Amino acid sequence: MHIWLSSCLLIVALHQITVAEPQEILRSLRPGHPRIIAPAGQEREVREVMRQNKVAAEIYKQIRLSAQEILRQKPVEYRLIGPRLLSESRRCLSRVYTLATVYRLEREQAMARRAIEEMLTAAAFKDWNPSHFLDTAEMTHALAIGYDWLYDVLSEEERQKIRQAIVDKGLRPGEKIYRSGGWWTKSQYNWNQVCNGGMTIGALAIAEDEPELAGWIVHHACKSLPIAMQQYAPDGAWAEGPGYWNYATSYTVYMLAALQTALGTDFGLSDLPGFSEAGTFRIHVIGTSGLAFNFADGGERPGESPAMFWLARRFNKPQYAWHEREVIRGRSPLHLWWFDPRGSGLEEEPLARHFRHADVVMMRSSWDRSVGFYVGLKGGDNAVNHSHLELGSFVLDFQGQRFATDLGPDDYNLPGYFGRQRWTYYRLNTEGQNTLWINRSNQEPRAVAPITHFSAGRKRMEAEVDLSAAYQQQVGKVVRRVVLEEGSPGEWTVSITDRLEGGQGAEIVWQMHTPAKVSLHGNRAELLLNHVRLWMEIASPSGATFELLPCNPPPPQRQNTGITKIGIRIQGSEEPLEISVRFLSQP
């Protein structure tokens, strides 16, 4: 069903996109520089925003401090970590944006010269590690922005060196991949957006000097991008999780913004179904703790996303800008160039959402971050890129604290992390998730768990996920239901109820990871975290008790320092079994 839906969405997406032919696509190219993302003349607008808005002024203050710190650091170096140059590409990109922003707003030559030093150093690298093409795409982005934004202070010799590096180490390797039908050109996931975005920005920067190559690259990138963008339909979610939502969406926005400013059009790409709702997913996936519901290979820190400002402007959604400005407090250069002062809160946003294509649910009792509960529930597909074996897993916040936590990814450089050993690692396999672990076995790696019921009333919200396919080798049927409801005014509870059938003789372990200090009292547990208390109780089956389980795998896997794992062990029977755990604000 998921394959059929993706194919249908892609057909719809491609019908909506008409991309000019390579020889025509640059006809509307904006002359001169800067023209990419923040074109010439926007400096005046930004200075006026800083004069009128204290938040924007503070963003610039932090950018300037970062730029001054960069002046004291050595330039990037050709240094691989595992198979990746990516950390150096990203360092170069961040530095160029930061230094060039200060130069453009204050015309401070020292900032421009330091950015140029950074670019010339990278331009002299033997290559930009095209075997891991994300590295190449991000380095191309870095030098393209510097070339475009600092064009007026580059000497002709410096322009030639940087331009030639963009072509020889960025665009030509990209051209080979497009011509051979390389895998990321057809990918539905983040590599598509990052690689196409980096190539497009590089091509637009040097387009007047290499028009044939630039036009060809932009045409093919625009034809490839919808394959990934269709994953936003119908409601803006990203199945790779919030960490890769940020990465993929950032590069989608970089590319669309570059097309708009340089060519005056994005060829309808931003109108593809679901993309206007991408910011809604980010708002809901961040809990009242300020941490993300970080399913898949993502950390719980949500990170900054200046793309939220761009999305707010493009789709007239002030709530996106408010959230990024007030909740995340982002302070990167593009937060300043795309700054949006609008929005006053999220009161009109529903407290619960089911994001259908990703099949995840988020519910909260209030948009006030200091009170009540937030809970996220994971359905979806174990075979999605970057997934863990975590169907049915949940996170839970109470009074602004993350009580049930997702451990996040492990080190990407572990042997076989993206290969045969992936499901041997604790943080990725089922033992390391807040879900059921049955017969000490992993969930089926290709299982799909649909959200079969979702409702959101004013005082009761609930969702149900069918986990049967995940445990088909161990039991007959498994359904998890999560309910967030208000009893007496202001007193909310969360219940997680698992119904199992056909589990005779199975060892069933209910499990939850928490950073809280835990005190067990039979079928009750008291959790204390940063002076906030939360109580848990086993509502069924009678006689079941909590216990503490080990959660630190052997090195070199990451150790889960400060984490306690709470479990319930139950033996399956012929009769249907119900395991129900309640979270209470009062003992």
Image (cartoon, rainbow, N blue to C red):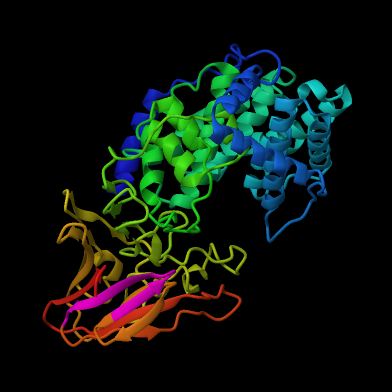
In this rendering, would 140 be left or right of 479? Answer: right
Question: Eyeballing the image, is 130 above or below 106?
Answer: below
Res. 431 image quadrant: bottom left
526 within the magenta span: yes
| Residue 54 rendering spot, x and y as whole percentages | 55, 33
Residue 225 in percent (x, y) is at 49, 34
Q: Is residue 42 above or below residue 468?
A: above
Q: Main secondary structure of the magenta part?
A: strand
Point out residue 359 in the picture as x, y percentages from the top left corner: 30, 51
Location of residue 396 in the rendering, given as x and y in whole percent from the top left corner:
34, 63
The residue located at (17%, 57%) in the rendering is: 489
575 to the left or right of 497: left
**Left or right relative to 354: residue 519:** right
Residue sitting at the far left: 575
Marker count (numbered): 0
Q: Quadrant of residue 564?
A: bottom left
Judging depth in this view, the residue of 255 and 369 nearest the camera is 369
Question: As rendered, which of 57 and 164 lies closer to the eye?
Answer: 57
Image quadrant occupied by the C terminus: bottom left
Q: Is residue 438 visible?
A: no
Q: Is residue 105 visible?
A: yes
Task: Please give the range of residues in magenta.
Answer: 525-541
Q: Is residue 90 above or below residue 204?
A: below
Residue occupying the point 66% across, 18% down: 40
Q: Is residue 217 magenta?
A: no
480 with respect to 301 (left or right): left
- Where residue 567 sits, quadrant-wise, is bottom left
